[in-house]
Image (tube, rainbow, N blue to C red):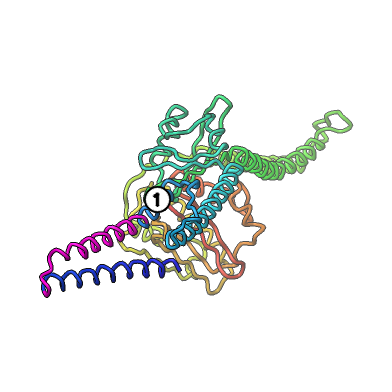
Amino acid sequence: MISKSIYVNILIRVLLLLAGSLFLGWLIFHRQAYVFAIIPSLFILGVTINLIYFLNRINRRIFYFFDAIKNEDSTLRFPNNVNNKVINDLNQSLQKVNAQIQQIYLENRKQEQYFQALLEHAATGMFTFNEKGFILHSNNLARQLFDMDVLTHINQLDRIDPKLYQTIKEIQPTEQRLVTLHLKSGVIQLLIKSNSFISENNSLMLISVHDIKNQLDEKELESWRKLIRVMMHEIMNSITPVTSLSESLAGYFYKNGAMVSPEDITVKTIETTIRGLEVIREQGKGLINFVESYRKITRLPAPEKKVFQVKNLIDHIRILSSSFENAGRIEFSCNVTPSELELHADEKQISQVLINLVKNACQANEGNENAKIQIEATVNEAGRATISVTDNGPGISDELMDKIFIPFFTTKDNGSGIGLSISRQIMQLHGGSLKMSSVPEKYTSAVLEF
């Protein structure tokens, strides 16, 4: 082994130095042969110089080796035909280590190229930047979305759209935001997600940008289709009997295309006509109410936000819910954790949402003898305030769950079908969300997240 050869060579030189020193000391202190002492002194000097040269020769090769690794120099070669066996063994060992390091370097390069290819072919635009805003990596799709050939600093985004630049600059790790850009090529809507990581002691931010305009257009189109189907259903249910009744009433006064004579019009005919007109009037009022409901969901006022105690709000809802139908047979429970939890929102609008949810829960538990409704306010793992309304009623099937937020869709005989739609719009105006979950015959839960 190389270490054994080095140890043997160093040991031999040390022993020679020790022997020379002892011989020199014997000549000086015992024989007082000062003239002859020159010979061992020269011997000691020669062995010392040889030892230093030997160690320096080894150190130089090791230094060159580490310097080459530091500079990623793959051309460094160590000859293996040196006459000195120790140096020859050292060269061979360094050459093997160098070959292994170069192999690892090549494999890392292959991995880097592989992931770079994956990044370039990803269906999402990506780029990373450091704390000073310098963009270190960006794939082709990100540059295409921003309509730029080169991305070097996030300040370039300010020239594209100041709102985009501000969003990228202020976005926090694990956060996502939606930005609409007006470019020369058209309008695009970007979903921006972020994450942070540490690379070589540098804090970097990874940004992914995805154009979701097509997906949003498809969702919007599908929403319009569902809305139109429901509206057509409601309008046809109102218009069809009106049309049929109008034709029947007209038959009392027209025969074979000609108006009947006044003598043929009886009191019974007039009474039937009046009742028919009353029915037509009621159907007309129903259509007016339907249109008024549509106006409600399209003209929601902007929330007037202020800070208020959630506990006071839930106490208010608890008192109001006692007047709902079936409320006397339902066990209510309320919990606010922490008790001093506050919200910055429009208290009246949030109260409207909670009243609607509690009322729906009461109506759903009409035939439930052991009905329970729980209102709970807390802070979730993401640090966001939530209010949930949970009941143990019959639940909502998966088929109906996809439709409950469609305006005018209802399973109730006297329902308007706009309560949940308006509630979700109110939460969206607050920058939050309304989510429903249910297991049939077990529970239904509506969660407001702010």
Closer to the camera, 395 or 383? 383
Residue 208 position within the rendered picture, expressed as x and y whole percent measured from the top left:
51, 44
Residue 404 position within the rendered picture, expressed as x and y whole percent measured from the top left:
60, 53
Q: Residue at 48% x, 67% y: name it.
A: 373
Position of 41 with respect to 367 (left or right) is left
Q: Residue at 53% x, 27% y: name it.
A: 183
Closer to the camera, 123 or 219? 123
Position of 259 with respect to 271 (left or right) is right
Judge whether 242 appears above or below 47 on screen: above
Residue 250 appears anywhere in the view: yes
In which quadrant of the rendered image does the N terminus lie? bottom left
Secondary structure mostly taken by the magenta-highlighted segment of the chain: helix
Does residue 131 belong to the magenta stretch? no
Specify the amino acid type for callout 1. Tyr
- In which quadrant of the rendered view does residue 226 lie? top right
Q: Residue at 41% x, 43% y: name it.
A: 171
Residue 190 position within the rendered picture, expressed as x and y whole percent measured from the top left:
53, 38
Position of 34 with respect to 212 (left or right) is left
Does residue 48 belong to the magenta stretch? yes
Residue 284 appears anywhere in the view: no
Judge whether 219 appears above or below 43 on screen: above
Magenta span: 30-57
Judge whether 252 appears above or below 113 on screen: above
Residue at the right extreme of this rendering: 256
> Which residue lies under the disc numbered 1?
64
Closer to the camera, 85 or 28? 28
Q: Residue at 28% x, 69% y: name it.
A: 16
